[in-house]
Amino acid sequence: MQNNETMRVQDRKSRIEKHHIEDLIGRSYMSLCVLLLIISIVSMVYFVTSKGISTFAIDKVSLADFFFGTKWSPEGDNPTFGALPFIAGSFITTLLAALIASPLSICAALFMTEIVPGWGKKLLQPVIELLSGIPSVVYGFVGLSVIVPFLRNVFPGQGIGVAAGALVLSVMILPTITSVAADALSALPRNLKESSFALGATRWQTISRVILPTTLPAILTGVVLGMARAFGEALAVQMVIGNAPFIPKSLFESASTLTSVITLGMGNTTMRSPHNNALWSMALVLMLMTFLFVFIVRLLEKRRSI
Amino acid sequence: MKARAVDKIATIVIVTLALLIVAVLAGLLGYILFRGMSHISWDFLTSAPRKIREGGGIGPQLFNSLFLLILTLLITVPLGLGAGIYMAEYARPGRITGFIRLIVEVLSSFPSIVVGLFGLLLIVNIFGLGFSLVSGALALTVFNLPLMVRITEQAFRSVPAQQKEAGFALGLSKWKIVTTVLFPVALPAIITGTILSAGRVFGEAAALMFTAGMSSPRLDFGNWNPLSPSSPLNPFRPAETLAVHIWKINSEGLAPDAAQIAAGASAVLVITVLIFNLVARYVGRLIYRKLTASRRMN
Amino acid sequence: MEATLTAPQILKAPKMERDFRTENLSIFYGTYEAVKGISLPFPEKSVTALIGPSGCGKSTFLRSLNRMNDEISGSTSKGSIWIDGVDINAPGTDVIKLRQKIGMVWQKPNPFYKSIYENIAFGPKYHGVKGKKALDEIVESSLRRAALWDEVKDRLKDSALALSGGQQQRLCIARALSVNPQILLLDEPASALDPVSTGKVEELIKELKEQLRIVIVTHNMQQAARVSDFTAYFYLGQLIEYGMTEKVFTNPENTMTQEYIMGRFG
């Protein structure tokens, strides 16, 4: 009897039904899509890395000269590939943009969730969505035709420079930080706030002592995501920063970032030339920074769940 | 007493800064539309740009942007659906799923200029596709795919689990359930997300400068043979898009009216993105209503 | 009613060829044993009610009967589920084919986001029924069996979501019936409904048991007493008591069963 039943079960197994075929087709199709996704990132990492290290492997530029050299003159008989001005430019603009955008974004998030949760959200939600939808070249154009002349009139210098770049970037990363912060604030358990209010705390005391400390990792996640966007943004910054290959001594002096120098240089160099390879090395730096930003975001998210 | 005063000041500061953001957006939109609208005319939208003389239009660029968007969506949407469905319905928690999730996250935060360089190296040079619409569309696929995967995954995850169970209980295969029971429910969210991502694709420039190229051949809009080099439909021709055009005239424009052209083109770009936003909301709601017949419920 | 066997008869009867029962069935979520080695028969033409406090494993047990737990990752099972002399819990069973034989209805009505007609015709169409006429017939007969036909016959093309909650639940029953199952599993089918709709669903259960076996999970003791022929009391994943409903409700053997039922009635 036992035998008989096993056989019938086996029999069911061996028959190929319509649903087997359907599931097979579905699974193959999805696997193909996922595979393409994996291939695209693996090949991107591979190509950027292999091109990026050729500055050091083939052109024999030392790591110290590249990362700490301040002189960038890639053409000529005795080229130097000091990329520090661009690395510094990227970090300065990104940090400044985060410093400008973070308080604004946190205030916007508080406005949406704590101060006037009803119409505050209705007002700011579309504003944030539209700000994030505006293309970066448009930000660059407005920066060039509004912010730069304004800075030129008010401060010394030509208007172009780190300050202009940071201002444009700060508007561009506002939506990222605000939406992450607002999500975190609205996910906060209600009783947390209520118990604080019950103790007689004012709204600001509740916000500063209870709400912000609890949501700090989440808000920082938003800030890091915003910085990642700022660090990788190319055209808007390039259009307003001036593109001089020096470490700026003031905020109103022309400077460059990694992305701006790639944008301008890539079209004017030939493949496999040392100049071109040096640009790929900067792309490699951008990629490694992306990994770092994602890593930090993951660390922060881990802290959130605990 | 003191705490009250601090509370009041803090509230005022928060409200002021929040409203400042609204003012920034209003100023931004107002400026772009105010400066650009006066330059927009039928002629501007349809005629070809001029290098040195004034009066050039953005016709080919506008066409290129739209064509490239369609090509990109044709590649991205099926791929994004497949991978997104996998993540939402099939992936079991584990290392591989974690790895794919990491990939999507990394890919979505990749600087678009790096995506452009990658496209230049692999698609333009190694694959030999040259500066072309196809190259641009493939680069934009890399750029847009992670977003599409997320949109799909979220849309499927928000379908009530009981829908799937009902399908299982009827003896349907999982793939059948996914495609015919869950998909229609997830569709409004997918469409809304896709249209919003289309706005992003439409405005992207950095990934395209070195893939779709920064020039456009003389197009003959009477020639609809996709294999002819002067045909607008030829996917293997270089194609400067609107966003790339704005960048180019801002940095190296020689025409005396370059600033007005940039303003007009920016306005067109922003208006298009606004339309995408509005359409996304409207279409999503419309389909949802049709599916659930919620109007009848009221 | 005359065909219904009494509980003692069924429990003593030899294993029939056409039977449906579990044997030593255990369900695990990871290492947690949610259902502990339960053997239970589900006699023909009768309603078996599974009762017990929340978390006692009765819903898990019900869901395992059509291998629905397979879809939850980390869920495993031991033991057998016998249907017509075949252990459907054995590895290699074609779960998808199997589910066609076992209909299921949940606590919350879950019609597909499709028209009323499509909700019913969808399953049969998938399983190979062709032709509009054949499908029309199935739709009508399924809706009639679920006592919904008269209310919806003029608006079959409307979205199923436009129906009231009670109508939706009967539509779900009709949908389950559309593929001609031999067994119907009901997971608290009336707990989200108003009293009138509940009455209709209970009426329906009594009618349907003439055609198939029904297993129902319910928190409502009155309902269990009204509709079921046999009752099984679960507690902490174990089967505490099983017998004819009348006996379990009026004269339970186990004091735990008594306390639970009394507590719920009071």
Image (cartoon, rainbow, N blue to C red):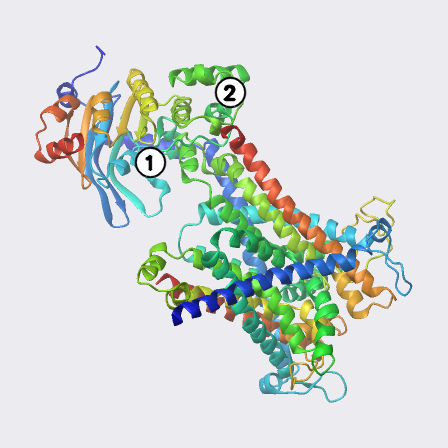
Q: CA distance from mark 1 to mark 2?
A: 32 Å
Q: Nearer the viewer, residue C158 or B4?
A: B4
Labels 1, 2: front one:
2
Q: Which residue is mark 1?
A: C67
Dot label at residue C136? none
Mark 1 or mark 2: whose residue is earlier in sequence: 1
Judging by the rendered image, the residue that carries numbered circle 2 is: C156
In the image, residue A268 lies at what x, y percent? Answer: 77, 73
| C59 relative to B180 in the view: left or right | left
* Image location (x, y in percent) of residue B265: 77, 58
Residue furthest out toward the top: C2
Instruction: Estimate the x, y position of residue C195 in percent, counting from the top left.
Output: 31, 24
- Dividing the image into 4 quarters, which one contains the N terminus of chain A? top left
Q: Is residue C223 left or right of residue B169?
A: left
Q: Is residue B154 visible?
A: yes
Callout 1 amino acid: Arg
Chain of the residue displaying label 1: C
Q: Answer with left or right where residue B162 lies relative to residue A244.
A: left
> Quick check: C97 above or below A255?
above
Find numbered disc 2 in the image and state the secondary structure of the residue it sits on.
loop
- Residue at image location 43% in from the left, 37% down from the top: B164
Type of the residue with mark 2: Leu
Subunit bearing disc 2: C
> Taking the image as drawn, is residue A57 in sight?
no
Under tag 1, what secondary structure? Answer: loop
